Amino acid sequence: MTAPLPLPESFALTFRGYDREQVDERIDELLAEIHLLTADRDAAVAEAETLARQLERARADHAELSARADRLCRAPADPAAVGDRVRHLLELAHAEAGAVVTTARERAAAIVREAEEAARQRTADARAQAYRIVDDARRRADRLAEIERRTADRLRRIDAYLADAESVLEEQPPLRAVA
């Protein structure tokens, strides 16, 4: 994000008011900055949407892995149908598989929680940044409108002053050249 451009306290006075080129140049600078701020806001919103899509993919992957683990655990070999040694090995394998499934579920749940929190935080950050950008642009636009209003008031006073001066000059007798 760029640093805000300082607003001049006043514009240079010319014969008939303020220097129009200087005022137009300042307005162009402010409009360019508003466009940049809007682009920054749009980029932040797009990033938040991307993170939301990634979170949805992670949730879908988690659901798929959970369903797969459940299917694998539902149909274990029956320990009663085999010998004691094999039965003992199968019981150990079932216990280990249960521990692995539990650990995998815990890790997957932790990953999903972290992804959700990161997505929430980035979304909140992006929204906050977008609101700050928009508020800053509004303040600048309001300040520019106030400068424009003051400039218009000053121009009206200058025009009135010049009209009074012209009428006074027209009422004065012409000056004679001194020889």
Image (spheres, rainbow, N blue to C red):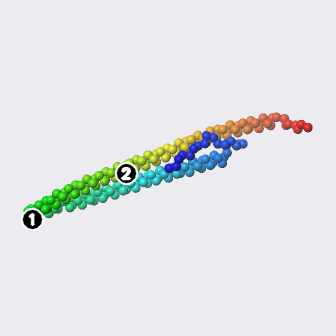
Determine if residue 151 is in view. Answer: yes
In the rendering, at what x and y percent does residue 149 appear?
Answer: 61, 40
Q: Secondary structure at mark 1?
A: loop
Total labels drawn:
2
Answer left or right for 22 relative to 68: right
The residue at 52%/49% (across/down) is 2
**Which labelled disc corresponds to residue 82?**
1
- Looking at marks 2 and 1 on the same chain, the residue that comes earlier in the sequence is marked by 1
Is 114 drawn above or below residue 171 in the view shown?
below
The residue at 53%/51% (across/down) is 35
User: Which one is in front in this view, the residue at disc 2 or the one at disc 1?
Assistant: 1
Q: Which residue in the protein does label 2 denote?
A: 119
In the rendering, at what x and y percent does residue 109 appear?
Answer: 28, 53
Discs 2, 1 touching: Cβ within 8 Å: no
The CA span between labels 2 and 1 is 50 Å
Determine if residue 81 is in view. Answer: no
Amino acid bearing label 2 = Ala
Residues packed near mark 1 inside 10 Å, few (<14), some (14 to 19) or many (20 plus): few
Amino acid bearing label 1 = Val
Is 39 drawn above or below residue 139 in the view shown?
below
In the rendering, at what x and y percent does residue 89 appear?
Answer: 13, 62
Is 162 drawn above or below residue 133 in the view shown?
above
Q: Secondary structure at mark 2?
A: helix
